[in-house]
Structures are given as C-alpha cells and as structure tokens.
Amino acid sequence: MKGITQDFVWGVLVSLLVASVAIILFKFSNFENIVYNLILILMATNLVTTSYYILYTSKMRLKPDEKLKESELRLKAIKSSIKEAEKAYYNRKISESTYKKIIESFQQEEIMLKSQINVLK
C-alpha cells in the first residue's frame, strides 16, 4: 500500500518551518515577536500536517478483498523477481553471495505474504 511515510511528514514540517522562520526573520525585528510567531507557526504546521496525514491514511485503508488482491499481486511479483534473480545468477551477472541474499529476502517476504493470504481467505 502506498501512503505517506513518516519521512514525508517530517520533510513537510521542516520545509514549512524553514520557510516560516525566514519570513519571520525578514518581517519582524523584535526578538519577542519572533519567538511568539515561531511557536504559533510550529503549532499551526503541526496541526495542518497531522490532520492531513490522518485524513489521507483513512482514505488509503484497504478493504479485506482489496488487501487479498494486493497480496496476491505482490506474491506474483516476488515469484517473477526470484526467476529474474536466478537468470542473473546463471548468466554470471551477480555473485553467489548476492544471489543467496536476494533469494533469502524474497523467500522471507513470500512466506509472510502466503500467511497473510491464508488469514485473509
């Protein structure tokens, strides 16, 4: 499921913070006003990004049948990725240690997806 990550939210917060600090520094020269306005802007930025994140993630929640379809698609993608990794290994494009790491990670994800599919069915 694609959604907003925590890094994205922090990126929005930091960019808004930097822009607001720059505006405040250019607009006001009194130190007290800068501090009060900075606190106000931080609170407003936090409120806006938090409410946006909550609204966005509530729209992105999948229904059980949609989760099942997505899990089955991911499982097919993993199986095709395993085949591609095998081809690359047999054509000597990747080393044996790299191949083993790739296959191990794919197999772990495949097991997790199969158990998730069994729970959803």
Image (cartoon, helix red, strand yellow):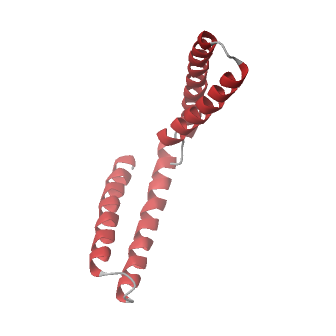
Horizontal relation, residue 1 to residue 21: left or right: left
Residue 120 in percent (x, y) is at 39, 47
Q: Please state the horizontal and vertical placement of residue 64, each as a whole percent of the image.
A: 47, 43
The one nearer the camera, 33 or 17, is: 33
Among all residues in the image, which is located at the extreme right? 27
Residue at 66% from the left image edge and 23% from the top image edge: 25
Residue displayed at 69% across by 26% down: 23
The answer to whether 49 is drawn above or below residue 115 in the figure is above
Is 3 located above or below residue 16 in the figure?
A: below
Q: Residue 16 is drawn in which quadrant?
A: top right
Residue located 36% across and 88% down the image: 92
- Which is more toward the observer, 116 or 12? 12
Residue 66 visible? The answer is yes
Up/down of 73 relative to 120, above or below: below
Residue farthest toward the bottom in the current orientation of the protein: 91
Tally of numbered tags: 0
Whether residue 5 is visible here, answered yes or no, is: no
Q: Position of residue 50 (x, y in %)?
A: 55, 27
Q: Nearer the viewer, residue 76 or 81?
A: 81
Position of 14 relative to 113 (above/below): above
Locate residue 109: give its quadrant. bottom left
Q: Is residue 105 left or right of residue 36?
A: left
Identity of the residue drawn at 62% across and 26% down: 21
What x and y, as percent, mark residue 9?
A: 53, 36
